[in-house]
Image: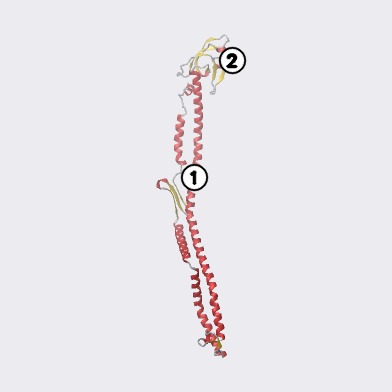
Amino acid sequence: MGFFKDLLGGGDTGTGTAREAMAKANELAPGIRFNPWTVRTSTGTTAYDPATGGYRSELSSPFQQYLTQATGGAQGFLSQLSQFDPRQRTQQIVEQNAALLDPLFAQQRAKQAGQSFMSGRLGLRLAGEGVGAGEGSGMVNPDFFGLNVAQSQALAGLVPQASQQAYNEMGQLAQMGTGLMSSAMGVSGLEQQLLSLGVDAETARSAANTAAANVVMQPYGMMQQAQAAKAGNRAAMGAGIIKGAATAFSDMRLKDNITHVDTLPNGIKLYTWEWNNATIQEPTFGVLAQEVLETIPEAVVVHDSGYLMVDYSHPELKGVH
């Protein structure tokens, strides 16, 4: 009776398994979804929470301070660079260095005057420009003239050196500004690295849970496939019995109260019986498949379910049904 209960739909047709599988899937779903998360490191904190607007990253206090200082410093250097005039700076450097040389030049002139006095050359006059010790007289002392030329050449040599220094300062401003800006951008990029760290961690967790859920759900799929095949067998078997087709189940395992009532001329016995499922209202007269298998094997087929069926259209069985 249990077989025909399943055979004709009295048993589990698979909907129970499907409901159980859906319940289990709903139970596992939260672990598979991309859940809210928070990751904290020495660099800072990153989190994801759709309820509060999605993703966020925040650097720790030391990194925030450095980022502020680096950004401010870079802006300061680049602002100075935009206002830097190398020619004006060259002039400033020349004037500063010339001012530093003035005391030395004065000492050199005083020393030269003393030496000229001691040598008796202080009173010597030559025709020339009004410079040196002879200034105002239209004449020049050769010793003072040579010193004056040397000092003028020294001042003139300050210009290319000052120009080179000015352009070096300009390059240093650019280098320091861009260096700090690059450093600030590197620190700012830590926020993106933090976010990627959290996303990667949650992606790995979700993937692991998905793989685990697939393992958990696989038996349900196999059960449903088996039950679907079973339901197909029940439908085919039911059609063979209910419709009274030429080929019908006649396996003695499906019958109770089997009684011998007659015998065909070829020796095949005829029986009456009761199906072991009282819900089957079909002919209960015919042959036993196991006996027919011994004498007319070609009239017996094995169903996918494993039960035997008899082809009552076989010439040796005509008139039985």
Vertical relation: 186 (above or below) 51: below
Where is residue 316? Give x, y as percent.
57, 12
Q: Nearer the viewer, mark 1 or mark 2?
A: 1
Q: Which residue corresponds to the image point at 50% horizontal and 33% vertical from the top-left?
A: 221
Where is residue 201? Give x, y as percent.
49, 47
**Earlier residue among tags 1 and 2:** 1
| Residue pointed to by mark 2 | 296
For the question of whether residue 110 can be seen, the reply is: no
Vertical relation: 263 (above or below) 211: above
In terms of depth relative to the viewer, which is nearer, 54 or 3? Answer: 54
Quarter-of-image position of residue 300: top right
Amino acid, disc 2: Ile
Label disc, if present, on residue 203 of the rendered structure = 1
Vertical relation: 71 (above or below) 105: above
Label disc, if present, on residue 295 of the rendered structure = none
Secondary structure under tag 2 reads loop
Q: CA distance from mark 1 to mark 2?
A: 66 Å
In terms of depth relative to the viewer, which is nearer, 159 or 183? Answer: 159
Secondary structure under tag 1 reads helix
